[in-house]
C-alpha cells in the first residue's frame, strides 16, 4: 500500500470524530426523516427527505474522502449510471460503451437512450482505443471489464476523449478507490456500484458518482433531487459502516487473489485463467502501471459447463451467487445471464477467508472437476 493510501485509510476512520462535541456518539447516527422542523425562510437548513439527509451526507463525505472528489450517493450502481447518462446526454449525442462490460449499462442505453435519439455504440475493452473518440459526447470505460477482466488504458482514453471535447466516465466497481484512481488519470467522472466491495457485506444496493467538475456535480445533484433517485437512509448508514472496513477487506481479498491466481493457472482442471496480476496475462503490463492492486476477481475457464457447475456448487468456501465483492467468496457462470463468455467461464470473487483455508478448499474441488 502506498503511503497516500495508508493516510487516506487512517483519516477515513477519524472524519467524524474530528467534528464532534462532547457527548456525541462516535459512530454516525441514522437519521430517518422525510420532514424537518422548518419555520420561516427554509434556506440553509435540511428541508425535505428528497433533498437532504444527514446520513447520506455522512456517507458522501466518506466516499468523497476516498475518491479525492465530491460524491453523490445513489440507491444502486445502475441508479448512479443512469444519473450520469441523464445529466450529460441530449438527443443527437453519441455514447460509446464497452461491448464486454456490465450488461445492464448497455441494456439501459439501448432500451431508453436510443429511442430518445442518442446514438449508442460499443467496442471491446481490449481494443478500446482503436478508432479514436472523435464525435462522442460520453465515453464509458470499464476496466478491468466485468466479467471478462480485460483492461484498457484510462489515461490514454481520457486524453484522447478530452482532445475530442468529450467526457470520460470510468466504472470503477471492480477496483474501488484503493485499487485504481481514474480521476487522477484524467477521467471526468467515476461511477461505482457500492453494492459490491465498497459495502462488502452483500446486504444492500448502493452506488455513487464522483467528479471534480462543479457543473457536472450540480447537474447530477439536480438529477437526483428531481428524479427522486435517492438512497434510503438505513442503506446509506450500513454502506458507511461497510466503508470503514474497506481497506482491511480489500487488502485481504487482493492478497488472497494474488496468492491463489498462479496456483489456479497451474492447475490441470482449468483451460485458462484471467487475472491482471498474472505476469502472463495479456493485460498485465498495463494493469501494473494503472492499478494499485490487481483486484479480487479471477476468471476461470473449465473444460466443460458441467465441471464449472460442480466446482461452484461443491466447494465448501464458495457461495454460488450472482454479484461479487462480498466477504464470502462467491462464483458463477456468467453465460447463464447471456454474457458473451464461454459456457464454462466462471467469475470467481475472492472474499475474506484466510488463503490458507480457502486454497485447500478450492484445490479439493478442482481435483474433483478433473476426475
Ligand atoms: C453490479 C454492477 C453495476 C450495477 O450495480 P447495481 O448496484 O447492481 O445497480 C454496474 N457496474 C458494474 C461493473 C457492476 O458490477
Image (spheres, grey):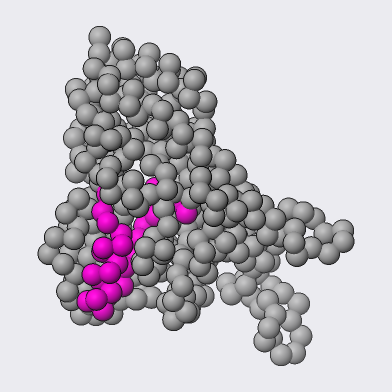
Q: Is residue 254 above or below residue 78?
A: above
Q: Is residue 213 above or below residue 269?
A: below
Residue at 41 percent across and 28 percent down: it is 259
Q: Is residue 127 magenta?
A: no
Residue at 34 percent across and 22 percent down: it is 263
Q: Is residue 350 above or below residue 218?
A: above
Of residues 264 and 117, the one nearer the viewer is: 264
Residue sitting farthest toward the right:
22
Give the quadrant of residue 267.
top left
Magenta span of residues: 151-177
In the image: residue 49, left or right of residue 127: right
Residue at 31 percent across and 40 percent down: it is 276
In the image: residue 337, left or right of residue 253: left
Residue 74: x and y in percent read 49, 63
Q: Indicate the quadrant containing the C terminus: top left, top right, bottom left or bottom right.
A: top left
Residue sitting farthest toward the top:
371
Of residues 177 and 103, the one nearer the viewer is: 177
Residue at 70 percent across and 80 percent down: it is 45
> Can residue 151 be spotted in the picture?
yes
In the image: residue 10, left or right of residue 206: right
Amino acid at each position: 500500500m502506498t503511503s497516500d493510501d495508508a493516510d487516506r485509510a487512517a483519516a477515513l476512520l477519524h472524519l467524524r470524530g474530528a467534528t464532534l462535541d462532547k457527548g456525541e456518539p462516535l459512530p454516525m447516527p441514522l437519521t430517518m426523516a422525510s420532514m424537518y422542523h422548518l419555520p420561516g425562510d427554509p434556506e440553509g437548513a435540511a428541508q425535505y427527505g428528497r433533498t437532504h439527509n444527514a446520513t447520506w451526507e455522512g456517507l458522501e463525505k466518506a466516499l468523497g474522502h476516498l475518491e479525492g472528489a465530491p460524491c453523490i450517493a445513489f440507491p444502486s450502481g445502475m441508479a448512479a449510471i443512469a444519473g450520469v447518462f441523464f445529466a450529460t446526454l441530449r438527443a443527437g449525442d453519441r455514447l460509446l460503451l464497452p461491448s464486454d462490460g456490465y450488461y445492464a449499462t448497455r441494456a439501459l442505453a439501448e432500451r431508453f437512450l436510443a429511442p430518445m435519439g442518442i446514438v449508442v455504440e460499443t467496442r471491446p475493452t481490449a481494443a478500446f482505443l482503436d478508432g479514436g473518440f472523435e464525435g462522442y459526447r460520453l465515453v464509458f470505460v470499464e476496466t478491468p471489464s466485468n466479467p471478462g477482466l480485460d483492461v484498457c488504458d484510462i489515461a490514454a482514453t481520457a486524453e484522447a476523449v478530452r482532445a475530442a471535447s468529450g467526457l470520460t466516465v470510468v466504472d470503477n466497481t471492480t477496483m474501488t478507490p484503493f485499487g485504481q484512481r481514474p480521476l487522477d488519470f484524467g477521467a471526468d467522472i467515476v461511477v461505482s456500484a457500492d453494492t459490491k466491495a465498497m459495502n462488502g457485506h452483500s446486504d444492500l444496493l448502493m452506488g455513487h458518482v464522483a467528479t471534480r467538475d462543479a457543473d457536472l456535480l450540480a447537474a447530477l445533484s439536480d438529477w437526483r433531487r428531481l428524479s427522486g433517485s435517492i438512497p434510503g437512509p438505513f442503506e446509506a448508514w450500513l454502506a458507511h459502516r461497510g466503508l470503514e472496513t474497506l481497506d482491511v477487506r480489500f487488502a485481504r481479498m487482493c492478497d488472497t487473489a494474488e496468492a491463489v491466481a498462479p496456483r489456479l493457472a497451474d492447475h490441470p482442471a482449468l483451460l485458462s485463467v484471467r487475472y491482471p496480476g498474472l505476469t502472463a496475462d495479456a493485460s498485465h503490463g498495463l494493469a501494473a502501471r494503472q492499478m494499485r492492486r490487481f483486484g479480487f476477481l479471477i476468471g476461470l475457464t473449465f473444460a466443460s459447463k458441467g465441471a464449472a457447475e460442480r466446482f461452484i456448487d461443491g466447494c465448501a468456501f464458495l457461495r454460488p451467487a450472482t454479484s461479487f465483492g462480498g466477504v464470502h467468496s462467491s462464483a458463477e457462470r456468467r453465460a447463464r445471464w447471456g454474457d458473451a463468455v464461454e459456457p464454462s467461464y466462471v467469475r470467481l470473487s475472492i472474499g475474506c477467508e484466510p488463503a490458507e483455508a480457502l486454497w485447500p478448499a478450492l484445490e479439493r474441488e478442482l481435483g474433483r472437476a478433473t476426475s
